[in-house]
Image (cartoon, grey):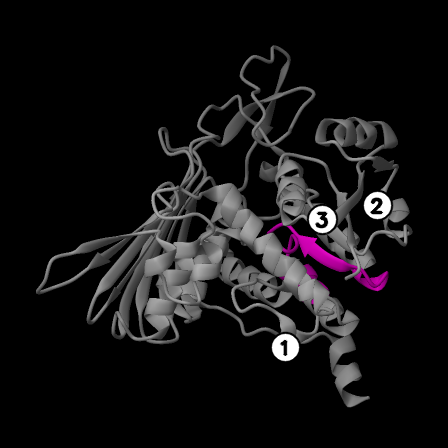
Amino acid sequence: MKKLGMGLVGPGFIAAHHIDAVRRLGDVEIIGIAGSSLDSAKQRARDLGVARAYANYQALLADPAVHVVHNTTPNHLHKEISLAALRAGKHVISDKPLASSVQESRELFDAARNAGVANVVTFNYRGHALVQQARAMVAKGKLGAPVLVHGCYLQDWLTDERTYTWRLDPKLGGASSALGDIGSHWCDLAEHVTGARITAVLADLHTAVPVRQAPATSAKAFANQTKSTQRRKVAITSEDLASVLLRFDNGARGSLLVGQVLPGHKNDLRLEINGRLASLAWRQEQPNELWIGHHAQANTLLSRDPALLDTSARPYAHLPAGHPEAWADAFRNLIADAYTWIRKGGKPDGKPSALPSFADGYRNSLVIDAMLRSNAAGGVWQNVEAPRETTSSKKGKRG
């Protein structure tokens, strides 16, 4: 079996986790890293134990040893780099969001479909075994007809006004901050687990910290910036809080709370689904437990035990009961699914069912865009637009 070569563009915070996940697969060669300069790429390559560094992403794409490109750059660079990789015939694994706007996401979706290669967006919470267990239970009718889908994604890393990141700059991170960054994860998870689609939203967005004291020299995400002495005032226009009402195409209602300025909440993603027969709830910070609620019998707590899981969820659990698996393991599961698809040539019928593609990334952009439109209209219901094809794909179909 041919050994695949992987190259990574954008050696920031998440890059180390992409490298780690690929190394755990054992059958993929990490070829090299491209950064904003050759010096920065060399430094990051040394830090991560990668042999080769490229001065720019064009040099990486030109290397025939690279078959798969991992795009971990800031949002505003997603389209440019992923599009170039697709045109070079490379398989692409992109961090979420797929791009900075609906228009860019649609263009990437269309280009990926025309390229006929594997195209993946890292909605990595799908990789948890109990998320797949919840999905299987819903699909098999264990909950009955879903009536309510609700939850939150709460963090506190932007609480201090002295913390600043490129994600808060609309030119770099896009029009949305909290929703685009973490709300996108929740929306994808809710749709994936329920098998339903969000059709309409009513959103209220707020900026709790309207002015930040940004460091004069750094805007790296998650960096400890509170000790920096030289600062500049930056007016913030994107949201750090959001509350959203939801309607699903199966008749269910829902609600979502998102925030990144909430002390004590580190990475608090929660999803609960209430059906006519039963309920279930999963929390990312306790990923090895799935709560199952009943009306006329005792509630239960299902621990991640491969022997007790649905056959569709079992491949995502690698350790025996009592041996916790968490964030990095779920990320590895998603990357494993991606390379399974890549080894099958990236054809549509070869994609693992749990794996999020550019189609999912495009759809997610439409959901977040509807939330932005709802808030801009003064907090009124907005329909989520149906995916539209670009002119190039329509021409391709006619030909």
Q: Position of residue 180 (x, y in %)?
A: 54, 49
Disc nearer the start of the sequence (2/1): 2
Tell me what residue is drawn at x 56 percent, y 21 percent: 224
Tell me what residue is drawn at x 57 percent, y 20 percent: 225
Q: Quadrant of the C terminus?
A: bottom right
Q: CA distance from mark 3 to mark 2?
A: 10 Å
Residue denoted by label 1: 349
Instruction: For label 3, count other residues whose C-alpha is less than 10 Å away and answer few (under 14), some (14-19) or many (20+).
Output: many
Amino acid beneath label 1: Asp
Magenta segment range?
A: 86-108
Q: In this orientation, does residue 39 appear?
A: yes
Residue 311, by quadrant, is bottom left
Q: CA distance from mark 2 to mark 1?
A: 30 Å
Q: Nearer the viewer, mark 3 or mark 1?
A: 1
Residue 273, by quadrant, is bottom left
Furthest residue toward left: 296
Residue denoted by label 3: 71
Residue denoted by label 2: 57
For this view, does 105 lie left or right of residue 289?
A: right
Q: Position of residue 149 (x, y in %)?
A: 32, 61
Whether 178 is drawn above or below 208: the answer is below
Disc nearer the start of the sequence (3/1): 3
Q: How many marks?
A: 3
Q: In this orientation, does residue 376 appear?
A: no
Nearer the observer, 331 or 174: 331
